[in-house]
Image: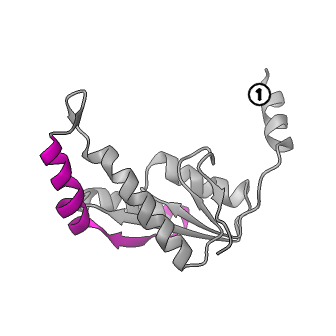
Amino acid sequence: MTISEILEKIHKTPVQKGEKVAVAFSGGLDSSLAIVLLRHIYQAQEIIPITIDVGQGEEEMAALHKIAKALGIEPLIIDAKEEFAQKWLNLAIQANSDYNGYPVSTSMTRQLLARIVAVEAQKLGCNAILEGSTGNGWQLLPKL
């Protein structure tokens, strides 16, 4: 398949249009690309980037804000450090959890982040949530 054929296929693929979309925004490549996709492919009317602070540290948060500024967004920062440390890490330590010798703390945050972003999206009246770079994680929320 040539580049032209791939681009043609992309442009012919129907996509849902976003109204008010919450994005789990980490400042990494995937969530940054998600912001661009929402604007240009999904034509989102309103994008709400949500960053969950689980103790990433000042350097990582500063990098996140630099990327957010370049994207023209202002992420909503939600502090979940205490919940992550008291509830999640505590259980991981008790279970001696690891993944091939690495602590599972990074992957453990995904469930916490997903819950917080979903709850916040509902509070803010979003009709969609996006995570990741491909749009595969984008789903319309059911009407409540």
Is residue 30 a member of the stretch shown in magenta? no
Magenta range is 70-95
Q: Residues within 10 Å of mark 1 (few under 14, many from 20)?
A: few
**Residue type at numbered disc 1:** Ile
Q: Which residue is pictured at 63% across the width and 48% down the height?
A: 135
Q: Disc 1 designates what residue?
A: 3
Q: Position of residue 82 (x, y in %)?
A: 21, 68
Q: Is residue 116 visible?
A: yes
Q: Is residue 140 left or right of residue 52?
A: right
Q: Is residue 32 left or right of residue 5?
A: left
Q: Residue furthest top?
A: 1
Q: Position of residue 70 (x, y in %)?
A: 50, 61
**Quarter assignment of residue 58:** bottom left
Does residue 124 lie above or below 75 as drawn? below
Q: Position of residue 128 (x, y in %)?
A: 63, 64
Q: Which residue is pictured at 31% across the width and 62% down the height?
A: 61
Instruction: From the viewer's side, name the closer residue of 75 and 104.
Output: 104
**Main secondary structure type of the part rendered in magenta:** helix
Q: Secondary structure at mark 1?
A: helix
Is residue 81 a member of the stretch shown in magenta? yes
**Quarter assignment of residue 38:** bottom right
